[in-house]
């Protein structure tokens, strides 16, 4: 397993792989790796000859400077974790390597980046689009792997690929959860023991919504989930939105969509957590 920090060396290594006719799979990450990331890497290794993992905390997608500052970084620990799975190349560039000059690109994602996360984190998805496009241009993967926990991000990246006509297949992988149901996230490291103990309440509320949605309107389900989560001291629900899985349009009636998903963003103390649940 190689650890490379420059774009030029990465391209040189991968050009040899392509000349040999081998397929390249890619897992972009911001580090602080956990079992959810490793599941993506395992899936990638099953379907490709060469596995590339990027580790880069991308500043353009943070609209909160404090959040960027507090984001966990430990490259040595991440490299150690990746030795347990089939990874051929770790691309771990510096900010200066990725952005020698500021990137002023502006994408038009339509409504996809206006709802939910986009409403509360302006500019976030444009930053995601900038870095994912850059990474795809550097790695030129045949397939790239993303977790469904970041459901809106997944929709944005699929749209980006269509928008730019990029020759990469986007592979979605199910959310990986702790035994108590908490969705795995690098941000979980920031929860104190008391917060970690109650964090699975988010998943329990989502399960209750899935099992009982037909008794409510979409707006009613949103209110029910918000109440279920916030009844435990320490939680503050930023949003609980029922949307169409393809368009991300908010639903007024269940008949408006063949496939609905409930997405939530919740503050537990100072830590912001997201999760989702397919309703039907």
Image: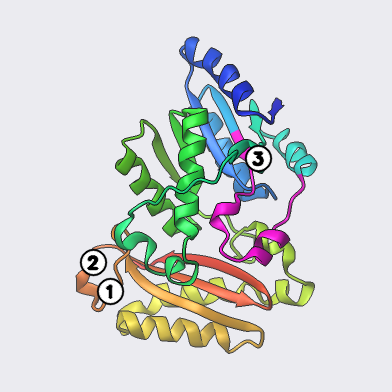
Q: Residue at x 47, y 46 (%)?
A: 130
Camera-side residue of 101 and 259: 101
Q: Position of residue 132 (x, y in %)?
A: 48, 43
Contact flag, marks 1 and 2 (Cβ < 8 Å) = yes
- The colour scheme is rainbow
SS for tag 1? loop
Mark 3 closeness class: few <14, some 14–19, many ≥20 residues within 10 Å: few
User: Which mark is nearer the camera, 2 or 3?
Assistant: 3
- Quarter that holds the C terminus: bottom left
SS for tag 3? helix
Q: Position of residue 271 (x, y in %)?
A: 66, 71
Q: Which residue is mark 3?
A: 96
Q: Residue at x 61, y 82 (%)?
A: 235
Decide if residue 71 is on the left or right side of residue 274.
right
Decide if residue 75 is on the left or right side of residue 67.
right
Determine whether 199 is above or below 175 in the image.
below
Q: Residue at x 30, y 59 (%)?
A: 110
Q: Magenta part of the protein: which range?
A: 53-74
Camera-side residue of 14 and 213: 14
Q: Which residue is mark 2?
A: 257
Decide if residue 256 is on the left or right side of residue 132.
left
SS for tag 2? loop
If you read the primary sequence from the N terminus, does the residue marked by circle 1 or circle 3 appear first? Answer: 3
If you read the primary sequence from the N terminus, does the residue marked by circle 2 or circle 3 appear first? Answer: 3
Asked if the magenta segment contains residue 71, the reply would be yes
Q: Position of residue 213 (x, y in %)?
A: 35, 78
In the displayed orientation, state which residue is furthest to the top: 20
Badge number at residue 251: 1
Determine whether 57 is above or below 118 in the image.
above
User: Which mark is nearer the camera, 1 or 2?
Assistant: 1
If you read the primary sequence from the N terminus, does the residue marked by circle 1 or circle 2 appear first? Answer: 1
């Amino acid at each position: 397993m190689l650890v490379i920090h420059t774009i030029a060396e990465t391209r040189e290594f991968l050009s040899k792989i392509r000349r040999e006719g081998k397929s390249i799979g890619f897992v972009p990450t911001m580090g602080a790796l956990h079992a959810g990331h490793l599941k993506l890497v395992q899936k990638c290794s099953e379907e490709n000859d060469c596995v590339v993992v990027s580790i880069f905390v991308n500043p353009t997608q943070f609209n909160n400077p404090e959040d960027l500052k507090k984001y966990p970084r430990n490259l040595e620990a991440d490299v150690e974790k990746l030795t347990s799975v089939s990874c051929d190349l770790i691309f771990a560039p510096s900010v200066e390597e990725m952005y020698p000059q500021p990137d002023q690109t502006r994408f038009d994602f339509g409504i996809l980046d206006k709802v939910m996360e986009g409403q509360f984190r302006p500019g976030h998805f444009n930053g995601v689009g900038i870095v994912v496009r850059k990474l795809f241009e550097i790695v030129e993967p045949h397939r790239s792997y993303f977790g469904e926990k970041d459901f809106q991000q997944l929709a944005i990246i699929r749209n980006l690929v269509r928008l730019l006509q990029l020759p990469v297949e986007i592979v979605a992988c199910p959310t990986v959860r702790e035994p108590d149901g908490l969705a795995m996230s690098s941000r979980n490291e920031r929860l104190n023991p008391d917060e970690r103990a109650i964090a699975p309440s988010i998943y329990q509320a989502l399960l209750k919504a899935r099992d009982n949605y037909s008794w409510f309107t979409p707006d009613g389900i949103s209110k029910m989930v918000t109440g279920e989560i916030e009844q435990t001291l320490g939680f503050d629900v930023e949003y609980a939105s029922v949307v169409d899985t393809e368009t991300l349009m908010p639903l007024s009636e269940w008949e408006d969509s063949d496939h609905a998903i409930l997405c939530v963003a919740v503050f537990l103390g100072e830590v912001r957590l997201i999760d989702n649940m397919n309703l039907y």
